[in-house]
Image (cartoon, rainbow, N blue to C red):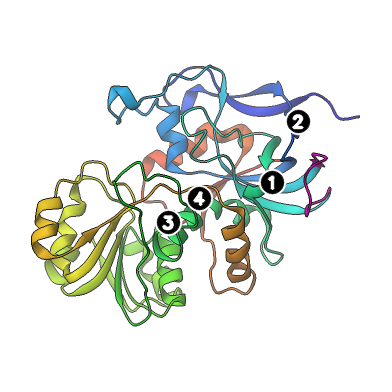
């Protein structure tokens, strides 16, 4: 009989990485519509450290006031332990991966930093057979972000960042610039753009030059030596995986009729300039989507898209993983392994 206790990394107050505690926690159950997964690996994402820190960068009215303790983490890969009676198409022992309850639990934690997590069945997909749990856990949020920005939105939920629905732009034959190309979203965005027939300009630090060459990009710009907005002109689309207030500088790189897609849109003030230049600025909120992960699984299985791992840490050392994230210049994904 399974214990009703598991190990998890919990947060009892907002603050630095040292506040992440590896401790006993109640084991969840698979309620109707859900699957209980024995977690093998957990992928880290910026919302993890934003929530750990209390989303202090947001306006006060947007900041969370959750009930502590909470368990961070949305991305996981593991093996199905139990299935609710109303769930079909997945069974005990299946290897699966998912982005769990995002963004609906973004302000209270999606509970993946743990030995077990319950997941809505609609958010699960079979783990790609040809990659391990570490690489599968590194995929969901970053891959779904790139997919929903560039390939297919996949939902009709209201857009929290703008009044209109984000619509991906056809990429075949287009020139696409990806800023932050070495990071989690960026390294997947360049691969999806190449898959869809685009010419890709990758902007990243110099240490990513070799990786970008391996991924087949057409032009590399080391931002520590050259400012992309000073040398690039007439591209069709910019995906800025860094975003923030500086994303407006990429307006000058785009041709009239082009599109600027900031993954992190807060702080952007260039809407008037974009309108003058005839450029569409559009963003969206990534959402859990098992069907899209199932589509992407085929690309991960056949090597069309691959997940780059920056570093791995045991679940018990989640604080060290967050410290690594805080140092920045991450190449690919940071992943926690669960014994």
Residue designated by label 2: 29
Helix, strand or loop at label 3? It is helix
Q: Residues within 10 Å of mark 3 (few under 14, many from 20)?
A: many
Q: Position of residue 5 (x, y in %)?
A: 77, 23
Q: Which quadrant of the structure image shows residue 21?
A: top right
Q: Is residue 245 above or below residue 310?
A: above
Mark sitting earlier along the chain (3/1): 1
User: What residue is shown at x 79% (from left), y 50% (from top)?
Assistant: 88
Disc 3 and disc 2: Cα gap in Å?
Answer: 31 Å
Q: Nearer the viewer, mark 1 or mark 4?
A: 1
Answer with mark 2 or mark 4, whichever residue precedes in sequence: 2
* Residue matched to label 4: 141
Can you say whether 120 is above or below 151 in the image? above
| Marks 4 and 3 close (CB-CB < 8 Å) | no
The residue at 78%/55% (across/down) is 89
Dot 4 alpha-carbon crowd within 10 angstroms: few under 14, some 14 to 19, many 20 or more: many
Mark 1 or mark 4: name the one nearer the start of the chain: 1
x and y percent of residue 292 in the render?
Answer: 57, 59
- Secondary element under disc 4, as helix, strand or loop, is helix
Compared across the picture, whether 244 is left or right of 125 comes to left
The mark lying in front, picked from 3 and 1, is 1
* Residue 70 vs residue 85, the one in the foreground: 85
Instruction: Give the distance between the C-alpha atoms of the residues marked 2 and 4, in whole angstroms.
Output: 24 Å
Q: Secondary structure at mark 2?
A: loop
Q: Over which residues does the magenta segment extend?
A: 82-92
Tag 1's secondary structure?
helix
Assess whether mark 1 and mark 2 are in contact (beta carbons under 8 angstroms). no
- From mark 3 to mark 1, how far is it between C-alphas? 24 Å
Residue 112 visible here: yes
Question: Pointer 3: what residue?
Answer: 185
Q: CA distance from mark 4 to mark 3?
A: 8 Å
Q: What residue did someone put label 1 on? A: 121
């Amino acid at each position: 009989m399974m214990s009703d206790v598991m190990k998890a990394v919990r947060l009892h107050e907002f603050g630095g990485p040292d506040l992440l505690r590896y401790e006993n926690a109640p084991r969840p159950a698979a309620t109707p519509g859900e699957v209980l997964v024995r977690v093998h690996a957990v992928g880290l994402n910026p919302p993890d450290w934003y929530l750990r820190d209390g989303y202090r960068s947001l306006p006060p009215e947007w900041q969370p006031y959750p009930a502590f303790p909470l368990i961070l983490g949305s991305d996981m890969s593991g093996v199905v332990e139990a299935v609710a009676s109303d769930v079909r198409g997945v069974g005990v022992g299946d290897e699966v991966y998912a982005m769990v309850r995002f963004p609906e639990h973004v302000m209270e934690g999606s509970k993946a930093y743990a030995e077990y997590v319950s997941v809505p069945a609609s958010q699960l997909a079979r783990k790609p057979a040809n990659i391990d749990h570490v690489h599968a856990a590194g995929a969901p949020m970053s891959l779904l972000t790139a997919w929903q920005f560039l390939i297919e939105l996949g939902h009709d939920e209201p857009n929290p960042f703008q009044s209109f629905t984000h619509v991906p732009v056809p990429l075949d034959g287009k020139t696409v610039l990806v800023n932050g190309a070495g990071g989690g979203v960026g390294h997947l965005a360049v691969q999806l753009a190449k898959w869809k027939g685009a010419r890709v300009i990758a902007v990243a630090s110099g240490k990513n030059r070799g990786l970008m060459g391996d991924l087949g990009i057409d032009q590399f710009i080391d931002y520590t030596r050259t400012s992309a907005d000073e040398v690039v002109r007439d591209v069709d689309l910019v995906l800025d995986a860094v975003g923030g207030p500086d994303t407006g500088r990429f307006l000058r790189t785009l041709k009239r009729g082009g599109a600027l897609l900031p993954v992190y849109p807060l702080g952007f003030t260039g809407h008037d300039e974009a309108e003058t230049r005839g450029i569409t600025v559009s963003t969206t909120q990534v959402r859990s989507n098992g069907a899209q992960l199932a589509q992407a699984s085929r690309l991960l299985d056949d090597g069309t898209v691959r997940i780059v791992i920056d570093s791995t840490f045991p679940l018990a050392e989640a604080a060290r993983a967050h410290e690594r994230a805080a140092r920045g210049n991450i190449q690919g994904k940071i992943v926690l392994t669960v014994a």
